[in-house]
Image (spheres, helix red, strand yellow):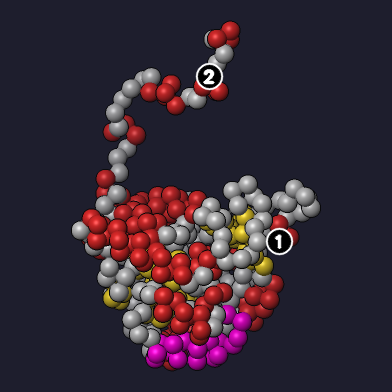
């Protein structure tokens, strides 16, 4: 089950990604107790606006028919999460104290602080201070927060320009002595290009990809669910993330460390992401909505899969991505499409 993520050894490839469930020390400890290989503490920065944004947050679980579900922490497998969010609600000093205490106590799991920049120049100072004060083994820099376009200007940054990703990464890499895990947006037509830029800047691992922004009308109230645009994710996103993992692996090489996020719900989802090219997988919404037992079940399912096949987590990374072919590489049959037109959609005989 062990993997190496950008120079940091993890007992397993499941990373509990930053979210509201990891604001408190108790939440982080619960994720550790459940067995996560790493836990990313709720993100912070220096912005008062980013802290205040958490007070404007709201959440909706919806099923495959867009009906809003009860928030009972036992959602069906097909549920998706629509939400607004903010950063750690306390001061940056309080956040540093929280992370430092958790790093000092960590056992069997790696505690990773996360910074979502509000200002790139200030982000370097925050990174230096975070590493010095907490003794962390790695630092996540998240430039892919989906809410940036809707949040108060200056609260958080979402980066879609490769050159700026590279410049920020290289500046932080030069300033701190621990590995950088850079987290990217999925709201780009070239996620692989952003990842290549991050690696060119010296990132040790790249996480892809952040959730999408969406708007869901409520047919009863005829108003937007939650009243605003909101970040949207669910199991449906897994194949989209897998595509970008495979494209990125092809572009940057198999020796680069990729971390998957957006779409994983189960242990077999972790397997799917590993096969697509990820070395490790962040579970975030699944744990927020399903509780920390999601981690226990996912790890058990992953272990069962690997044992049954005589595989290791590191050994299956990229196997499916490396077998990708093009459309014209597949068997040719000019009438094959006819087998997939269901009877109800076929042309009636009198119109044929």
Give left or right: position of 181 versus 28.
left
Residue 122: x percent and y percent? 52, 81
Q: Is residue 19 above or below residue 231?
A: below
From this viewpoint, which residue is outermost toward the right? 221
Which residue carries the number 2 mark? 346
The answer to which of marks 1 and 2 sits earlier in the sequence is 1
Residue 219: x percent and y percent? 75, 48
- Quarter containing the N terminus: bottom left
Q: In the figure, residue 57 lies in which quadrant? A: bottom right
At horizontal 50% and vertical 64% (from top left) the residue drawn is 286
Which residue carries the number 1 mark? 226
Q: Is residue 196 visible?
A: no
Q: Main secondary structure of the magenta part?
A: helix
- Quarter containing the C terminus: top right
From this viewpoint, which residue is outermost toward the top? 350
User: Which segment did they paint magenta?
Assistant: 88-105
């Amino acid at each position: 089950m062990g993997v190496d993520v950008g120079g940091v050894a993890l007992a397993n490839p499941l990373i509990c990604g930053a979210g509201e469930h990891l604001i408190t020390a108790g939440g982080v400890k619960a994720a550790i107790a459940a067995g996560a290989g790493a836990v990313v503490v709720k993100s912070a920065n220096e912005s008062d606006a980013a802290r205040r944004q958490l007070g404007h947050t709201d959440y909706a679980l919806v099923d495959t028919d867009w009906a809003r579900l009860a928030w009972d922490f036992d959602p069906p497998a097909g549920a998706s999460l629509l939400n607004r969010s903010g950063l750690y609600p306390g001061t940056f000093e309080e956040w540093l104290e929280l992370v430092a205490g958790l790093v000092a106590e960590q056992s069997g799991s790696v505690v990773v602080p996360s910074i979502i920049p509000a200002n790139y120049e200030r982000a370097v100072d925050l990174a230096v201070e975070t590493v010095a004060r907490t003794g962390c083994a790695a630092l996540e820099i998240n430039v892919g927060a989906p809410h940036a376009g809707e949040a108060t200007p200056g609260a958080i940054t979402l980066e879609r320009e490769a050159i700026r990703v590279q410049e920020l990464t290289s500046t932080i890499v030069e300033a701190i002595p621990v590995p950088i895990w850079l987290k990217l947006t999925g709201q780009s037509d070239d996620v692989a290009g952003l990842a290549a830029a991050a690696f060119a800047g010296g990132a040790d691992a790249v996480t892809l990809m952040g959730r999408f922004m969406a708007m869901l009308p409520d047919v009863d109230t005829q108003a937007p669910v939650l009243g605003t645009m909101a970040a949207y994710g669910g199991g449906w996103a897994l194949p989209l993330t897998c595509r970008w993992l495979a494209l990125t692996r092809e572009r940057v090489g198999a020796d680069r460390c990729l971390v998957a996020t957006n779409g994983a719900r189960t242990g077999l989802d972790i397997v799917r992401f590993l096969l697509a090219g990820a070395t490790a997988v962040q579970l975030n919404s699944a744990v927020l909505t399903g509780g920390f037992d999601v981690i226990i079940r996912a790890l058990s399912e992953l272990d069962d899969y690997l044992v049954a096949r005589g595989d290791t987590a590191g050994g299956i990374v990229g196997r499916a991505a490396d077998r990708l072919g093009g459309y014209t590489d597949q068997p040719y049959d000019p009438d094959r499409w006819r087998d997939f037109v269901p009877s109800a959609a076929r042309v009636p005989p009198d119109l044929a």
